[in-house]
Amino acid sequence: MEKPIMSVSGIRGRFGEGLTLELLRAIAYIQTKHSNGAGKKVIIGRDTRPSGEKIQNALCQGIRAAGGIPISIGIATTPTTCFAVKHFGAAAGIIITASHNPHPYNGYKAVHTSGRLFNADECNALYEDYNSGNYLSDKEFNAFSASPEIIETTAVSAHIAKIVENVDVETIKAAKIKVAVDAINGAASGAFPQLLAALGVKYEGIHCKTDGDFVHNPEPRPAHLGDLEKLLKSESDFWGGFAFDPDGDRLVVMGENGEPICEEMTLALSMMSILASKKSDVATNLSTSMVIDDVAKNFGVKVIRTKIGEANVVDAIRKNDLLLGGEGNGGVIYPAVSMVRDGLVGLALIIECMAKNDKKITRLTSEYKEYPIVKEKISIVGLNPIEVLSKLAKIFADEKIDTQDGLKIIYNDGWVHIRSSNTEPIMRVYAEGITQEKAEELAKMVMDRI
């Protein structure tokens, strides 16, 4: 049986196999204890996976057993759930999602009372207590109700109102923008139409049900977005296309005529919107594109690089009091709204950027070089990733390397980053170059060594 992965990115696994209701109930109990949640609200939000409701019931038992008050906000994006924790004054929050993983995966993300995700130390404290057996027996848990105390229905509208407060709505409305959106029948399906209505933006959507039927690979990359491409090619009045992942914390863009655009450009476009009027350094991780450095240089700010993991980027934003951060996988973190990757925020910021510049997506992205990036992965079942990385570090010892997180080998015309995944039993190999050939060459160089 494949064990669930428990990392800084939360817990993920195959539901009903390694990822059991007993495990998740115990973690909810421990998190409520760690958050001093006795007598206080604990928010639960979930994406559209069919297993989400069963998991919510188990979490309610764990929260109640620790003295907390479980509050369900139903189907909601990860950023909406994080926003709701702070908005409703909760002690903690729990997100039921496996993000971009397909069925039958599901998972658990722990939310701090401030509305950010738990960082590495906080996650590890939960896992240590679980591994030590510091939770109740099944019989004791089953004495508690598996229903939420309250069903809260205003979280999405409150989140959207906060986003709208932080963009130039009048300029957006005046631009008369129309976009296409693929929500993969995930958590953003019910939220993005409300946001676009508030911004005065017309749209056509596909896969916008909340039934959890992920009709294509849920990883939001151009290669998986053929339906969105067809929609964009079918009409001539679109300004661009957008696609969410299942829990709505990531967003990718597509050209107005269906042109593929690298997911790394989501953060770059959001930076262009914010930095045009406000100056701030930007935090991102080691595997994010060099285009972020180009945008930052153009606006006279610096880029702070962190270890992989959203929580590490958030820690850098907090430590340096930054206005913006994010990751190259389509994740935008805008603290003015919430301290978490937020696909709805990214949607609003990029539409604002189009409106302010009176330019459609392809004209905006053409202002910066879109460096080719290759993303590969290798199964590490039965292998020790630490030993593999140690051997690679010796092989490339004469090159410029960064061992902050795995191994990053840096050249003048590109880089390659090798590390074990936080969410799957694989090793990721990301490479970027000034040409597609260079990126492929760098990736192959390392893959051959492995």
Image (cartoon, rainbow, N blue to C red):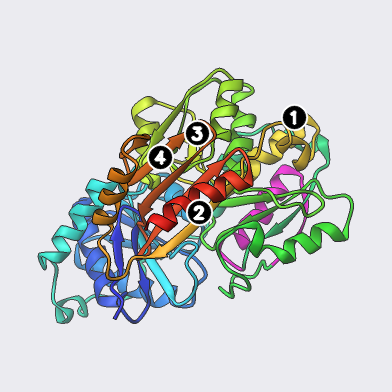
> Dot 1, how many residues are within 10 Å of its Cα: few (below 14), some (14-19), or many (20+)?
some
**Which comes before the other along the chain, label 3 or label 1?**
3
Instruction: Report crowding for label 3: few under 14, some 14 to 19, many 20 or more residues within 10 A (C-alpha).
Output: few
Rendered-image quadrant of the C terminus? bottom left
Is 15 drawn above or below residue 64 in the view shown? below
Q: Which is more foreground, mark 3 or mark 1?
A: 1
| Residue 238 place in picture, x, y as percent | 83, 50
Location of the N terminus (image quadrant): bottom left
- The residue that label 2 is drawn on is 155
Q: Amino acid at mark 3?
A: Ala
Q: Amino acid at mark 4?
A: Ile
- Quarter-wise, where is residue 61 in the image? bottom left
Task: Give the magenta range.
Answer: 185-206
Q: Is residue 310 visible?
A: yes
Q: Nearer the viewer, mark 1 or mark 2?
A: 1
- For residue 409, the mark is 4
Give the left or right position of residue 200, taking residue 214 as reference: right
Q: Which residue is mark 1?
A: 356
Q: CA distance from mark 3 to mark 1?
A: 20 Å
Q: Residue at x 72, y 31 (%)?
A: 367
Query: Where does residue 53 sit, x and y in percent of width and height?
Result: 43, 75
